[in-house]
Image (spheres, grey):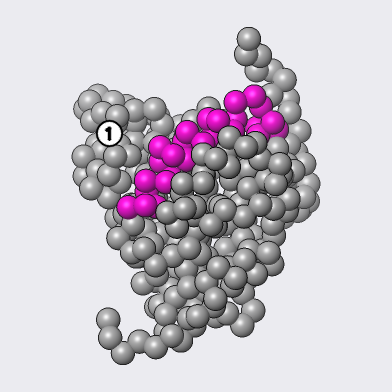
Amino acid sequence: MTGLGPQDGVDHVVLTRFNLPSRGPESIVRAREGWLRDRVALFERHTVPAMRGQTVAAFRWIVYLDPESPAWLIERLSPLADEGLIVPLRRTVVDWHDAAADARRVTGASHGILLTTNLDNDDAVAVDFVERLQASARRHPRAALFLRTGLILRDDRLYLRSDPENAFCSMSEPWDDPITAWRDWHTLLRTHAPVVAEPGAPGWLQIVHGRNVSNRVQGRLVDPAPYRRLFPGQLDGVRRPAGAQVWRDALIDRPARDAWHGTRSAGKDAFLRVFGKERLDAVKERLERVRSRSRPRAH
């Protein structure tokens, strides 16, 4: 595209919390033996190749690390920093003010729009994820942006999901007083900016595994074949479901999942309205501690 000046361009920063010290239910999960090595394996298997394969490379990817990270982790991630794929930053705490300041430092704030995007360290995105978000940011220079449609992978089954306020959230805004995609929970960004949920092909891939804190299977069971081009290498082990499996999912499993998630979401929203985020986090942490104690210990 010609005729665009710096004020029309986008400074795009992807933000990933890798192993930041944290409170809440995530802290219980991260304290378990083997969590970090398992997470690195997921990061290298899914997140890294997805970001390396983007159709647009004009972005910076900040990966936040605990200052007390083991030496083996720093050594493992160093090649990614050397190639310029990630910008590792060691922090004990990062809030949205810090994220905005770091974004300014790594980009130089050379364009008119700041676009920040949350990316978890165990998920993947489509090859055109960055390209689509940057195009959306140019159309909507002050908005919370989402690619509505995504995929959820559990074991060898793939599910197609529509979620207008998913965890792959972005914030598009001028540089004058940025709040970033980390200003609030992804489901609450609508309280800070207009929400734009872009339609289209799946833009993201959530990996549901044993150490997920909050992700669950949602959506409908699908054949992976139409989506392999968007997620090269990510769906290699996924089988085409048999007709009977698709019918069972449509008639029994999915309605049961939807009912459970609907009830859970309604209860969570009601609790949040009455007691607030801090109390909700405290309850989730308490429940995670109970689950952690009930799990058999590895020998």
Q: Residue at x 69, y 57 (%)?
A: 94
Q: Is residue 45 above or below residue 190?
A: above
- What segment is highlighted magenta in the picture? 28-53
* Image quarter of the N terminus: bottom left
Secondary structure beneath dot 1 equals loop
Q: Is residue 112 above or below residue 131?
A: below
Q: Is residue 20 left or right of residue 175?
A: right
Question: Which residue of the protein is positioned furthest toward the top in this rendering?
Answer: 299
> Observer-nearest residue: 37 or 297?
37
Q: Residue at x 51, y 39 (%)?
A: 76
Q: Which residue is mark 1?
A: 236
Q: Is residue 147 above or below residue 110?
A: above
> Observer-nearest residue: 128 or 11?
11
> Observer-nearest residue: 243 or 1?
1
Q: Is residue 204 above or below residue 297?
A: below
Q: Residue 21 colored magenta? A: no
Q: Residue 44 colored magenta? A: yes
| Chief SS of the magenta region | helix
Residue 194, given in percent of the width and then of the height, sits at 53, 72
Q: Residue at x 21, y 39 (%)?
A: 225
